[in-house]
Image: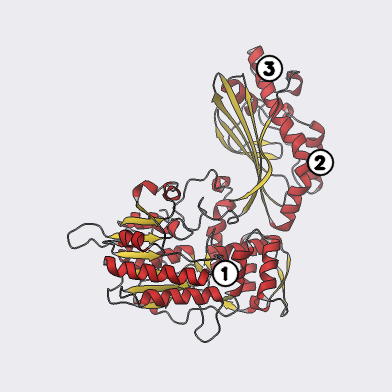
Amino acid sequence: MSELSAPTGREPALVAQPRADGSPPRALVLGATGYLGGRLVPRLLSAGYRVRVLARDPRRVEAFPWGDEVETVKGDATDRAAVTRAAEGVDVLYYLIHSMGGGRDFEDTDRRAARTVATAAAAAGAARIVYLGGLHPDDAPLSAHLRSRVEVGDILLASGVPTLVLQAGVVIGSGSASFEMVRHLTDVLPYMPAPKWVRNHIQPIAVRDVLHYLLGAARVAPDVNRAVDIGGPDVLRYGQMMNGYAIEAGLHQRAIASLPVLTPRLASHWVNLVTPIPKSIARPLVESLQNDCVVKDRAVDDLIPRPEGGLMPYREAVQRALGRLNDDAIETSWQDAEVSGAPSDPLPSDPEWAGRLVYTDERTMRTSASPEQLWSVIEGIGGENGWYSSPLLWAIRGWMDRLVGGVGLARGRRSRSIVTVGDALDFWRVEAIEPGHLLRLRAEMKVPGGAWLELRASPDGGGARFDQRALFFPTGLAGRLYWLSVLPFHGLIFSGMARRITAAAESVQRDDLAPKAKAGRIAPEIPEVETIASGSDAHA
C-alpha cells in the first residue's frame, strides 16, 4: 500500500466528510506549489476533497501531475480580490506560505498577506483556516522569522474564521529546508565547528506526519480556534540529528565542536559556504535554532488522532528520505522520476539545492544505423568486447579497483552477445534491461558512493539515437573529491565511448552481420559527439 493511499480511506478522521447536500467539501490551498503544498494537494484529492489553488503563475500548477484535477485562481495572498474569489464557498483554507528569504521587509509582507487572507476568508464565508507555523518557546526572544510566523498565526486566529495553527519544528523529508541543511552539512563535513546551538534540543517531525495532521485539521470541531504543537517522538540535540543522519547515510560519526563565538550571521555564511543552501535561506534556519524547540504538550491528540502505527521516529524518517537511493533506484533524479506517493520523496518543484547530490555525464550521438544494429553493439559491451574507449585507462581503473579489494576487470562477461539482468560485466552489474532500448549497469567497483551507467538506443528518423548517461551519487566529502579527480578523464573515456559505439553500429550496418563489438571494427570516420551535460551536478 503506497503512502499516498495509506492516510486516506483507512483512517476515518482524514477522509473528507460530505456536505449536507452530499457534495464533496472544497479545500483552498495557498502555497500549493511549495514544499508541503505540492505534497498535500494530491492527498486532499485522494481523501475526496475538491481542491482549488491560488497561484501567481498557473503554469507552475499545470506542471504537477495533479494540475488538471484542481481549479486554479490566478493571484497572490496580498491580492484581496483574488483571495476572496478563491475562498468563496471553501470548507477549509490551507495557509502554507511564508516569506523565507523574502528580503528585509519580509515581516511586513507576511503581515499584509495574513491580514488580506483573514479579511477575505471571513468575507467569503470560509469555514476553517489551517496554518502551519513554527514550533517555538513561549518565554524566550525569537528570531525575526519565527516572530513573523507567530504573528501570522495570531492574525489568522483573530480573523473570526475558526483557525487551527499547527506549530512544527524541523520537518524531515527530501526538500525540507531544515532537513536539507542537516543533510548537506553532514554529507560534506567529517568535522564541523559549530555554534553553541548544536546542543539545543529539537523535536523533528516526519513530513508524513505533518501531512497527516494537515489532513486531520480539516475535520476538527467547528468551535476549535487555537494553536497546537506537533512533533515526532524523538527529542534530540542538533548534533545528534546530524550523526543520526550520518548513520543512515552510511557515513562515519561526525566530530562536532561547539564554538560560542560563532554568531548566527557567521554561522549562516558558513552554511552557505559549505552547502548549496542560499544564505537567504540559511540565515533564518540558523536563527530559528537559537532556542530549544520542543513540543510543550500533546493537546493536538485531543483534536486529531495520531497516524496509524504512531508517529515516525527521526531515523526512520531519514531512512524514508534516503530510501530510494539506498534501494539503488537511480530514477529518483527529478529529471526522470514519476511523482511517487511517498511524501518523503523529492518533487520536481523542490528547490534545486534540495535532495541528495548527483553528478552526471551525458552524451548523445545520432547514427545512420538502425536501432536494432545499435542495440546489438550495446548488448555486447564489456568482457572481451571491451568498452570502446581508451583500453589503457579502463585497464588502469580495473587495476586500481583490484588494489583496494574490488573485483576489477577480471570477471569479464558470461556471454559475448547475450546479457540478462544480474549478469556481471567486468566491474559492472546489469541492473535493468529493456531489450532493444535500455541497458543500465550498476558499478561494483570500490568508489565512495553509488555509480551507474545507462546506454539507450531509440529510433531517430531513418537511423537511431544513442544516449549515454553516467551517474554518481557521492558519499560524503570523499565522494565529491573522487568525482572531481576523475572528471578530467571523462572527455577521453565517455566521449570516445559514445563515438566508437555508434561507429561500431555503422560497421554492423555495412556488414549486415551479427556484431563482434570489437574496437578493430570501428569505422575510420568517427562522428562528433554531442555533449548534453558533461561533469554536471544536480540534486535528486
Task: Name the kind of residue labelled 1 in the image.
Answer: Arg
Which mark is nearer the camera, 2 or 3? 3
Residue, disc 2: 399
Gap in angstroms between the C-alphas marked 2 and 3 = 31 Å
Amino acid on which disc 2 is placed = Trp
Image location of residue 260, percent across then percent down:
71, 80
Q: Is residue 376 above or below residue 98?
A: above
Task: Pinpoint residue 235: horizontal percent, then vertical percent.
Answer: 54, 76
The amino acid pointed to by label 3 is: Ser
Tell me which numbered mark, 1 or 3, is placed earlier along the sequence. Answer: 1
Residue 106: x and y in percent read 52, 69
In the image, 513 versus 71, the foreground residue is: 71
Does residue 310 show up? no
Residue at image point 39% right, 71% down = 115
Q: As drawn, is 148 to the left or to the right of 94?
A: right
Residue drawn at (76%, 20%), measured in percent from left and top? 520
Residue 217 visible: yes
* Secondary structure beneath label 3: helix
432 and 349: which is toward the camera = 349
Tell me the SS state at disc 1. Answer: loop
Q: Which residue is mark 3?
A: 507
Q: Residue furthest left?
A: 21
From the viewer's perspective, is the residue at label 1 or at label 2 nearer?
A: 1
